[in-house]
Image: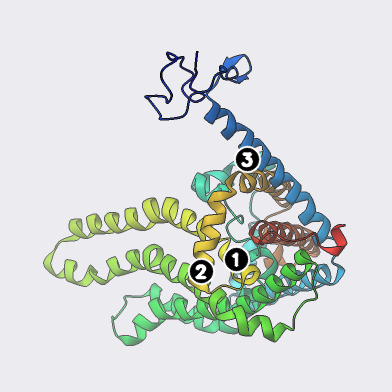
Amino acid sequence: MPWCPKCRYEYRPEIQCCPNCGTALEAEPPPPPPKVAGWRVEEKTARGFSGFKADFTAGLHIACRAARITFRARKLLLFVILLVTLYLLGCVVSTRAYLARNPQLLQHLLLHPPEQASVAERWLAGIHRRHPLDYLIQGFDSPLAKAADVSPPWLGALTSPLMMQQQRLWGREVKWDFQSIYWIFLFPLWQSVIVLIIDTLIVVGLLGWLFALASGTRPKRYREYLKNHYTSVLAITLLAYICFWIVFSLPPQVAELFRPLFDYYGYEGRLESLQRIFQFIAFDLFSAWLFPLALLLLAPAPFAIVARNLGAWGGVKTGARILWQRRWAFLALFFIYRVIYEVIQVAQLSLPSTRYLLLRADPASLLLWPVYLAFALLGLWLAMAFMLLIMPAREPAPHET
Protein backbone atom coordinates (compact mmCIF):
# COMPACT_ATOMS: atom_id res chain seq x y z
CA MET A 1 0.00 0.00 0.00
CA PRO A 2 1.43 3.45 -0.96
CA TRP A 3 2.10 6.11 1.65
CA CYS A 4 2.40 9.90 1.57
CA PRO A 5 5.81 10.87 3.03
CA LYS A 6 4.51 14.28 4.21
CA CYS A 7 0.96 13.63 5.40
CA ARG A 8 1.77 10.06 6.62
CA TYR A 9 -1.50 8.74 5.20
CA GLU A 10 -1.93 5.34 3.56
CA TYR A 11 -3.89 5.16 0.27
CA ARG A 12 -5.31 2.54 -2.08
CA PRO A 13 -2.92 0.99 -4.64
CA GLU A 14 -4.44 2.83 -7.64
CA ILE A 15 -3.71 6.30 -6.17
CA GLN A 16 -0.39 7.76 -7.35
CA CYS A 17 -0.33 11.23 -5.67
CA CYS A 18 -1.50 12.46 -2.27
CA PRO A 19 -4.84 14.29 -2.68
CA ASN A 20 -3.92 16.64 0.21
CA CYS A 21 -0.45 17.90 -0.73
CA GLY A 22 0.13 16.52 -4.23
CA THR A 23 3.32 14.65 -3.25
CA ALA A 24 4.14 11.40 -5.10
CA LEU A 25 3.34 8.40 -2.94
CA GLU A 26 6.01 5.93 -1.81
CA ALA A 27 5.81 2.22 -1.32
CA GLU A 28 7.36 2.22 2.14
CA PRO A 29 5.78 3.97 5.13
CA PRO A 30 7.61 7.09 6.33
CA PRO A 31 9.83 6.85 9.42
CA PRO A 32 8.15 7.52 12.77
CA PRO A 33 7.93 11.21 13.75
CA PRO A 34 10.73 12.56 15.95
CA LYS A 35 10.27 12.96 19.68
CA VAL A 36 11.66 15.52 22.11
CA ALA A 37 11.65 14.52 25.78
CA GLY A 38 9.19 11.75 24.94
CA TRP A 39 6.74 14.08 23.15
CA ARG A 40 5.93 13.68 19.48
CA VAL A 41 6.74 16.76 17.37
CA GLU A 42 6.13 17.66 13.76
CA GLU A 43 9.05 17.29 11.39
CA LYS A 44 9.06 21.01 10.60
CA THR A 45 9.27 21.80 14.30
CA ALA A 46 12.10 19.30 14.74
CA ARG A 47 14.01 20.88 11.84
CA GLY A 48 13.51 24.32 13.37
CA PHE A 49 14.75 23.10 16.75
CA SER A 50 17.87 21.51 15.24
CA GLY A 51 18.48 24.69 13.20
CA PHE A 52 18.16 26.82 16.34
CA LYS A 53 20.61 24.57 18.18
CA ALA A 54 23.15 24.65 15.33
CA ASP A 55 22.91 28.43 14.88
CA PHE A 56 23.11 29.07 18.62
CA THR A 57 26.20 26.86 18.81
CA ALA A 58 27.66 28.76 15.86
CA GLY A 59 27.10 32.01 17.78
CA LEU A 60 29.09 30.62 20.72
CA HIS A 61 31.86 29.59 18.33
CA ILE A 62 31.93 33.09 16.81
CA ALA A 63 32.16 34.57 20.31
CA CYS A 64 35.27 32.49 21.01
CA ARG A 65 36.85 33.36 17.65
CA ALA A 66 36.15 37.06 18.21
CA ALA A 67 37.85 36.96 21.62
CA ARG A 68 40.83 35.06 20.25
CA ILE A 69 41.37 37.46 17.32
CA THR A 70 40.66 40.66 19.27
CA PHE A 71 42.89 40.05 22.25
CA ARG A 72 45.85 39.00 20.10
CA ALA A 73 45.84 42.38 18.34
CA ARG A 74 48.24 44.29 20.60
CA LYS A 75 48.26 47.53 18.59
CA LEU A 76 44.45 47.65 18.59
CA LEU A 77 44.30 47.06 22.34
CA LEU A 78 46.92 49.75 23.00
CA PHE A 79 44.93 52.20 20.87
CA VAL A 80 41.71 51.49 22.81
CA ILE A 81 43.58 51.86 26.12
CA LEU A 82 44.78 55.28 24.92
CA LEU A 83 41.23 56.33 24.00
CA VAL A 84 39.87 55.25 27.38
CA THR A 85 42.65 57.14 29.16
CA LEU A 86 41.89 60.29 27.15
CA TYR A 87 38.21 59.85 27.96
CA LEU A 88 38.84 59.67 31.71
CA LEU A 89 41.23 62.64 31.60
CA GLY A 90 38.64 64.58 29.60
CA CYS A 91 36.00 63.85 32.24
CA VAL A 92 38.32 65.12 34.98
CA VAL A 93 39.31 68.26 33.04
CA SER A 94 35.73 69.16 32.08
CA THR A 95 34.54 68.56 35.65
CA ARG A 96 37.24 70.75 37.13
CA ALA A 97 36.47 73.47 34.57
CA TYR A 98 32.81 73.33 35.59
CA LEU A 99 33.69 73.50 39.30
CA ALA A 100 35.94 76.49 38.70
CA ARG A 101 32.82 78.38 37.61
CA ASN A 102 30.61 76.85 40.34
CA PRO A 103 32.72 76.60 43.54
CA GLN A 104 29.63 76.44 45.74
CA LEU A 105 28.77 73.05 44.20
CA LEU A 106 32.03 71.50 45.40
CA GLN A 107 31.58 72.96 48.89
CA HIS A 108 28.07 71.54 49.10
CA LEU A 109 29.31 68.16 47.92
CA LEU A 110 32.10 68.04 50.46
CA LEU A 111 29.73 68.98 53.29
CA HIS A 112 26.97 66.60 52.16
CA PRO A 113 28.46 63.51 50.50
CA PRO A 114 25.90 61.24 48.83
CA GLU A 115 24.61 58.31 50.82
CA GLN A 116 25.73 55.01 49.36
CA ALA A 117 23.13 52.27 49.25
CA SER A 118 24.13 48.63 48.99
CA VAL A 119 25.35 47.26 45.67
CA ALA A 120 22.18 45.20 45.26
CA GLU A 121 19.94 48.22 45.89
CA ARG A 122 21.89 50.37 43.44
CA TRP A 123 21.79 47.59 40.83
CA LEU A 124 18.02 47.24 41.14
CA ALA A 125 17.61 51.02 41.01
CA GLY A 126 19.55 51.07 37.75
CA ILE A 127 17.12 48.57 36.25
CA HIS A 128 14.05 50.48 37.45
CA ARG A 129 15.28 53.79 36.03
CA ARG A 130 15.26 52.41 32.49
CA HIS A 131 12.64 50.71 30.39
CA PRO A 132 13.29 46.92 30.34
CA LEU A 133 13.92 46.83 26.58
CA ASP A 134 16.25 49.81 26.71
CA TYR A 135 18.09 48.26 29.65
CA LEU A 136 18.51 44.86 28.00
CA ILE A 137 20.07 46.08 24.75
CA GLN A 138 22.16 48.75 26.49
CA GLY A 139 25.42 48.89 24.54
CA PHE A 140 24.48 45.88 22.39
CA ASP A 141 22.99 48.20 19.76
CA SER A 142 26.23 50.20 19.44
CA PRO A 143 29.20 47.90 20.10
CA LEU A 144 31.94 50.47 19.47
CA ALA A 145 30.37 53.26 21.53
CA LYS A 146 32.44 52.56 24.67
CA ALA A 147 35.66 52.21 22.68
CA ALA A 148 35.21 55.33 20.51
CA ASP A 149 33.27 57.80 22.69
CA VAL A 150 36.29 59.95 23.49
CA SER A 151 35.25 63.43 22.38
CA PRO A 152 32.26 64.46 24.60
CA PRO A 153 34.19 65.36 27.79
CA TRP A 154 36.73 67.44 25.86
CA LEU A 155 34.00 69.12 23.87
CA GLY A 156 32.14 69.76 27.12
CA ALA A 157 35.20 71.49 28.56
CA LEU A 158 35.46 73.69 25.46
CA THR A 159 31.77 74.59 25.36
CA SER A 160 31.00 74.78 29.09
CA PRO A 161 30.60 78.61 29.00
CA LEU A 162 28.06 78.18 26.22
CA MET A 163 26.23 75.47 28.18
CA MET A 164 26.07 77.78 31.21
CA GLN A 165 24.47 80.46 29.03
CA GLN A 166 21.89 77.90 27.95
CA GLN A 167 21.15 77.05 31.60
CA ARG A 168 20.74 80.75 32.46
CA LEU A 169 18.17 81.05 29.68
CA TRP A 170 16.15 78.21 31.16
CA GLY A 171 16.38 79.84 34.60
CA ARG A 172 14.45 82.95 33.59
CA GLU A 173 11.33 83.71 31.64
CA VAL A 174 12.21 82.92 28.05
CA LYS A 175 11.65 85.54 25.38
CA TRP A 176 11.07 83.60 22.20
CA ASP A 177 13.42 85.40 19.84
CA PHE A 178 15.99 83.82 17.52
CA GLN A 179 18.71 83.92 20.16
CA SER A 180 16.64 81.97 22.68
CA ILE A 181 15.54 79.44 20.08
CA TYR A 182 19.17 78.96 19.04
CA TRP A 183 20.48 78.29 22.57
CA ILE A 184 17.60 76.07 23.63
CA PHE A 185 16.92 74.09 20.44
CA LEU A 186 19.78 74.42 17.95
CA PHE A 187 22.82 74.59 20.25
CA PRO A 188 22.29 71.07 21.74
CA LEU A 189 21.71 69.75 18.21
CA TRP A 190 24.84 71.09 16.54
CA GLN A 191 26.98 70.36 19.60
CA SER A 192 25.95 66.70 19.51
CA VAL A 193 26.45 66.59 15.73
CA ILE A 194 30.05 67.76 16.22
CA VAL A 195 30.55 64.96 18.76
CA LEU A 196 29.16 62.42 16.27
CA ILE A 197 31.39 63.70 13.46
CA ILE A 198 34.51 63.34 15.65
CA ASP A 199 33.50 59.94 17.00
CA THR A 200 32.73 58.63 13.50
CA LEU A 201 36.33 59.39 12.50
CA ILE A 202 37.42 56.92 15.17
CA VAL A 203 34.66 54.39 14.48
CA VAL A 204 35.47 54.10 10.75
CA GLY A 205 39.12 53.45 11.54
CA LEU A 206 38.20 50.80 14.11
CA LEU A 207 35.80 49.14 11.67
CA GLY A 208 38.50 48.91 9.00
CA TRP A 209 40.96 47.56 11.56
CA LEU A 210 38.50 44.89 12.75
CA PHE A 211 37.69 43.86 9.18
CA ALA A 212 41.38 43.41 8.36
CA LEU A 213 41.91 41.31 11.49
CA ALA A 214 38.80 39.18 10.85
CA SER A 215 39.70 38.53 7.20
CA GLY A 216 43.41 38.03 7.82
CA THR A 217 44.34 40.76 5.32
CA ARG A 218 46.65 43.73 5.56
CA PRO A 219 44.84 46.88 6.76
CA LYS A 220 44.41 49.65 4.21
CA ARG A 221 45.51 53.18 4.85
CA TYR A 222 43.27 55.09 7.21
CA ARG A 223 42.39 57.72 4.59
CA GLU A 224 41.13 54.97 2.24
CA TYR A 225 38.63 53.80 4.85
CA LEU A 226 37.55 57.40 5.37
CA LYS A 227 37.19 57.97 1.63
CA ASN A 228 35.19 54.79 1.04
CA HIS A 229 33.03 54.49 4.15
CA TYR A 230 33.00 57.65 6.26
CA THR A 231 30.01 59.32 4.59
CA SER A 232 27.88 56.18 4.76
CA VAL A 233 28.65 55.44 8.42
CA LEU A 234 28.12 59.08 9.39
CA ALA A 235 24.78 59.16 7.53
CA ILE A 236 23.48 56.22 9.59
CA THR A 237 24.74 57.76 12.84
CA LEU A 238 23.19 61.13 12.05
CA LEU A 239 19.92 59.50 11.01
CA ALA A 240 19.63 57.72 14.35
CA TYR A 241 20.53 60.83 16.34
CA ILE A 242 18.31 63.29 14.43
CA CYS A 243 15.34 60.91 14.70
CA PHE A 244 16.01 60.64 18.43
CA TRP A 245 16.25 64.42 18.82
CA ILE A 246 13.09 65.12 16.78
CA VAL A 247 10.85 62.61 18.53
CA PHE A 248 12.40 62.32 21.99
CA SER A 249 13.76 65.78 22.78
CA LEU A 250 11.75 68.11 20.58
CA PRO A 251 8.09 67.38 21.61
CA PRO A 252 8.43 68.53 25.25
CA GLN A 253 10.24 71.65 24.08
CA VAL A 254 7.64 72.37 21.40
CA ALA A 255 4.92 72.10 24.04
CA GLU A 256 6.62 74.98 25.88
CA LEU A 257 6.24 77.16 22.78
CA PHE A 258 2.48 77.14 23.33
CA ARG A 259 2.75 78.35 26.93
CA PRO A 260 2.47 82.12 26.17
CA LEU A 261 -0.56 81.49 23.98
CA PHE A 262 -2.30 79.24 26.52
CA ASP A 263 -1.47 81.62 29.39
CA TYR A 264 -2.92 84.53 27.45
CA TYR A 265 -6.25 82.78 26.90
CA GLY A 266 -6.29 81.12 30.34
CA TYR A 267 -6.02 77.52 29.10
CA GLU A 268 -3.53 76.21 31.69
CA GLY A 269 -5.34 72.88 31.99
CA ARG A 270 -5.22 72.35 28.24
CA LEU A 271 -1.49 73.04 28.25
CA GLU A 272 -1.01 70.25 30.78
CA SER A 273 -3.04 67.90 28.58
CA LEU A 274 -0.94 68.85 25.57
CA GLN A 275 2.25 68.25 27.54
CA ARG A 276 1.02 64.82 28.62
CA ILE A 277 0.31 63.90 24.99
CA PHE A 278 3.78 65.00 23.91
CA GLN A 279 5.29 63.18 26.87
CA PHE A 280 3.51 59.94 25.95
CA ILE A 281 4.75 60.16 22.35
CA ALA A 282 8.31 61.02 23.33
CA PHE A 283 8.91 58.80 26.36
CA ASP A 284 6.33 56.02 26.66
CA LEU A 285 6.06 55.13 22.98
CA PHE A 286 9.17 56.22 21.10
CA SER A 287 11.96 56.13 23.69
CA ALA A 288 10.72 52.97 25.41
CA TRP A 289 9.99 50.76 22.39
CA LEU A 290 10.48 52.12 18.90
CA PHE A 291 13.87 53.77 19.29
CA PRO A 292 15.66 50.81 20.96
CA LEU A 293 14.33 48.43 18.29
CA ALA A 294 15.36 50.81 15.50
CA LEU A 295 18.87 51.12 16.95
CA LEU A 296 19.12 47.33 17.16
CA LEU A 297 18.21 47.05 13.46
CA LEU A 298 20.80 49.71 12.56
CA ALA A 299 23.59 48.14 14.66
CA PRO A 300 24.91 45.71 11.97
CA ALA A 301 24.79 48.37 9.20
CA PRO A 302 28.29 49.91 9.70
CA PHE A 303 29.83 46.42 9.71
CA ALA A 304 28.01 45.53 6.49
CA ILE A 305 29.18 48.80 4.90
CA VAL A 306 32.86 48.06 5.60
CA ALA A 307 32.85 44.26 5.23
CA ARG A 308 30.83 44.22 1.97
CA ASN A 309 31.76 47.64 0.58
CA LEU A 310 28.18 48.98 0.56
CA GLY A 311 26.55 52.38 0.82
CA ALA A 312 24.41 53.56 3.70
CA TRP A 313 21.08 52.17 2.46
CA GLY A 314 22.66 48.91 1.26
CA GLY A 315 24.32 48.50 4.65
CA VAL A 316 21.01 48.97 6.47
CA LYS A 317 19.21 46.42 4.27
CA THR A 318 22.02 43.87 4.40
CA GLY A 319 22.56 44.26 8.13
CA ALA A 320 18.85 43.88 8.94
CA ARG A 321 18.57 40.82 6.67
CA ILE A 322 21.58 39.09 8.25
CA LEU A 323 20.30 40.01 11.71
CA TRP A 324 17.09 38.13 10.92
CA GLN A 325 18.78 35.19 9.19
CA ARG A 326 21.26 34.65 12.02
CA ARG A 327 19.04 35.74 14.87
CA TRP A 328 19.90 32.73 17.06
CA ALA A 329 23.61 33.42 16.68
CA PHE A 330 22.93 37.02 17.72
CA LEU A 331 20.96 35.66 20.68
CA ALA A 332 23.95 33.58 21.75
CA LEU A 333 26.20 36.66 21.56
CA PHE A 334 23.60 38.68 23.44
CA PHE A 335 23.48 36.12 26.24
CA ILE A 336 27.26 36.16 26.71
CA TYR A 337 27.35 39.95 26.45
CA ARG A 338 24.70 40.48 29.12
CA VAL A 339 26.46 38.18 31.60
CA ILE A 340 29.82 39.96 31.18
CA TYR A 341 28.17 43.39 31.17
CA GLU A 342 26.42 42.73 34.48
CA VAL A 343 29.68 41.56 36.08
CA ILE A 344 31.39 44.82 35.05
CA GLN A 345 28.35 46.83 36.14
CA VAL A 346 28.41 45.28 39.61
CA ALA A 347 32.14 46.05 39.84
CA GLN A 348 31.40 49.68 38.99
CA LEU A 349 28.59 49.87 41.53
CA SER A 350 30.89 48.61 44.26
CA LEU A 351 32.81 51.92 43.90
CA PRO A 352 31.52 55.28 45.12
CA SER A 353 29.40 57.14 42.59
CA THR A 354 31.25 58.28 39.48
CA ARG A 355 30.03 61.86 39.84
CA TYR A 356 31.23 62.07 43.44
CA LEU A 357 34.70 60.77 42.63
CA LEU A 358 35.16 63.07 39.65
CA LEU A 359 33.88 66.17 41.41
CA ARG A 360 36.18 65.63 44.36
CA ALA A 361 39.09 64.67 42.09
CA ASP A 362 39.59 61.88 44.61
CA PRO A 363 42.58 59.56 43.97
CA ALA A 364 40.02 56.76 44.10
CA SER A 365 38.71 58.06 40.79
CA LEU A 366 41.64 56.21 39.21
CA LEU A 367 39.69 53.05 39.99
CA LEU A 368 37.22 54.10 37.30
CA TRP A 369 39.91 53.58 34.65
CA PRO A 370 39.85 49.74 34.68
CA VAL A 371 36.04 49.82 34.72
CA TYR A 372 35.91 52.10 31.67
CA LEU A 373 38.55 49.92 30.00
CA ALA A 374 36.58 46.75 30.70
CA PHE A 375 33.47 48.25 29.09
CA ALA A 376 35.53 49.37 26.07
CA LEU A 377 37.11 45.93 25.60
CA LEU A 378 33.69 44.30 25.91
CA GLY A 379 32.40 46.56 23.15
CA LEU A 380 35.46 45.80 21.03
CA TRP A 381 34.91 42.06 21.38
CA LEU A 382 31.24 42.47 20.48
CA ALA A 383 32.16 44.54 17.43
CA MET A 384 34.53 41.82 16.22
CA ALA A 385 31.77 39.25 16.68
CA PHE A 386 29.42 41.45 14.60
CA MET A 387 32.09 41.68 11.91
CA LEU A 388 32.47 37.89 11.77
CA LEU A 389 28.69 37.48 11.48
CA ILE A 390 28.37 40.04 8.70
CA MET A 391 31.36 38.98 6.59
CA PRO A 392 30.56 36.86 3.51
CA ALA A 393 31.67 33.24 3.36
CA ARG A 394 35.43 32.96 2.83
CA GLU A 395 38.41 30.68 3.26
CA PRO A 396 39.87 30.53 6.77
CA ALA A 397 42.26 33.37 7.57
CA PRO A 398 45.98 32.43 7.88
CA HIS A 399 46.01 32.98 11.65
CA GLU A 400 43.00 30.63 12.07
CA THR A 401 44.54 27.58 10.38
Distance CA(mark 2)–CA(mark 3): 45 Å
User: Which label is found at residue 121?
Assistant: 3
Q: Please state which of residues 304 and 185 is positioned toward the viewer in this rendering.
A: 304
Residue to which mark 1 is pinned: 304
Q: Secondary structure at mark 1?
A: helix
Percent position (x, y) of residue 91?
Answer: 68, 71
Distance CA(mark 3)–CA(mark 1): 40 Å
> For the residue marked with disc 3, what is the amino acid?
Glu
Percent position (x, y) of residue 111?
Answer: 65, 60
> Residue 277 is drawn in which quadrant?
bottom left
Q: Is residue 21 visible?
A: yes
Q: Secondary structure at mark 2?
A: helix
> For the residue marked with disc 1, what is the amino acid?
Ala
Mark 3, Cα crowd under 10 Å, few <14 / some 14-19 / many 20+, is few
Q: Secondary structure at mark 3?
A: helix
The first of marks 1 and 2 along the sequence is 1
The structure residue drawn at horizontal position 50% and vertical position 13%, both measured from the top left corner, is 1
